[in-house]
């Protein structure tokens, strides 16, 4: 194994780009990754449950259909049809998950990335880094399998909407960025280039300890805090989750619209989902004299 292998970790390089204090950089990056993971929670389940279904249920139903056919051809045909159906549904789920990240067709150009809880400065730094590793003919990204063998990663995986998850320290998050070809990245992703050369080429100045904070584009925390005292929250039917979530999002948008600058720049509804979810869960779990 190369002596500087660990230093070439994509995550370690990004931490150095974000902040001179690695602990501060780690907290900032992990906050973004955590918010993105919460946002895609339900959609990512399409990916995670589909693969086990393909590997287990269709073969079992197919084997059962052959056995049952010996006694009843009709029952065997029914089980055979069920086996085909159990295969098609997960395949559709995997197709939907791939399209959610990469859009239609093959990955010709990078998609707009999803960054939550990130300042404009941080987004700019991350996009500069990803643009570097997306270059055709540039240094290749790789990871090592359990035997320590180097495995190269197609550069197009950094084109996806969830590319920030490639920087996660958790293997399951990194694997969410992959198309369903059976691969899993259990080890950190690295790059065949010297970390210092990459940092110099990007010309990014990391934040200094004790320096001014990064500018947050949208005041999510302030909006959620102000909404806590809104009497309309007490009128929500918490048993109707979809309607309650929709109303909370509407009220958050109202806050941003009232506080928007002259450009009337407000966040997209999708960006508010993690905060809407936290408010709903808080209301759902709080003690209530009315027994709600």
Image (cartoon, helix red, strand yellow):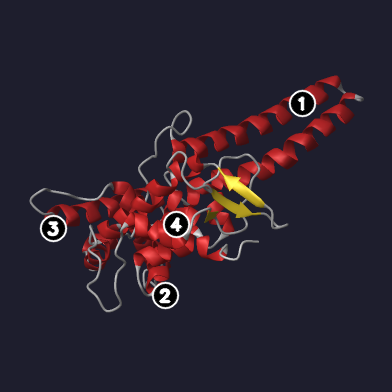
Query: Residue at left 52%, top 54%?
Result: 191
Nearer to the camera, 287 or 199: 199
The residue singled out by tag 3 in the image is 259
- Spatial CA span between label 2 and label 3: 33 Å
Find residue 59 and report its horizontal and vertical position in percent.
Answer: 78, 35
Q: Is residue 256 left or right of residue 170?
A: left
Label 4 – label 2 distance at C-alpha: 22 Å
What residue does disc 2 label? 23
Of circles 4 and 1, which is in front?
Answer: 4
Q: CA distance from mark 4 to mark 3?
A: 26 Å
Mark 2 or mark 3, whichever is nearer to me: 2
Would you name the residue on which mark 4 appears?
Answer: 38
Which one is earlier in the sequence, the residue at label 4 or at label 3?
A: 4
Q: Tag 1's secondary structure?
A: helix
Which element carries disc 4, helix, strand or loop? helix
Q: Nearer the viewer, mark 4 or mark 2?
A: 2
Question: In the image, what residue occupies the spot 54% across and 34% down?
Answer: 95
Nearest to N terminus: mark 1 or mark 2: 2
Residue that appears at 47% across and 54% down: 165
């Amino acid at each position: 194994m190369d002596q500087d292998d660990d230093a070439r970790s994509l995550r370690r390089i990004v931490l150095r780009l974000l902040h001179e204090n690695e602990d501060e950089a780690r907290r900032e990056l992990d906050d973004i990754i955590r918010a993105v993971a919460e946002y895609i929670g339900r959609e990512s389940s399409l990916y995670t449950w589909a693969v086990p279904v393909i590997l287990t249920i269709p073969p079992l139903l197919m084997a059962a259909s052959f056995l049952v056919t010996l006694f009843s051809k009709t029952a065997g045909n029914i089980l055979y049809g069920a086996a085909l159906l159990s295969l098609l549904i997960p395949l559709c789920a995997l197709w939907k998950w791939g399209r959610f990240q990469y859009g239609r067709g093959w990955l010709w150009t990078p998609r707009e990335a999803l960054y939550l809880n990130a300042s404009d400065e941080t987004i700019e730094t991350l996009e500069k880094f990803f643009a570097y590793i997306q270059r055709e003919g540039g240094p290749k990204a790789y990871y090592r399998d359990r035997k320590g063998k180097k495995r190269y990663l197609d550069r197009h995986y950094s084109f996806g909407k969830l590319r920030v998850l490639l920087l996660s320290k958790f293997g399951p998050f990194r694997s969410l960025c992959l198309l369903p070809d059976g691969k899993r990245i259990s080890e950190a992703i690295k790059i065949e280039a010297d970390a210092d050369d990459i940092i110099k080429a990007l010309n990014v100045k990391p934040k200094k300890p004790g320096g001014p904070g990064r500018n947050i584009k949208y005041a999510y925390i302030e909006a959620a805090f102000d909404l806590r005292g809104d009497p309309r929250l007490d009128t929500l039917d918490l048993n109707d989750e979809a309607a309650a979530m929709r109303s909370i999002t509407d009220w958050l948008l109202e806050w941003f619209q009232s506080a928007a600058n002259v450009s009337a720049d407000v966040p997209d509804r999708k960006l508010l989902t993690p905060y809407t979810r936290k408010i709903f869960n808080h209301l759902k779990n709080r003690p209530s004299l009315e027994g709600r």
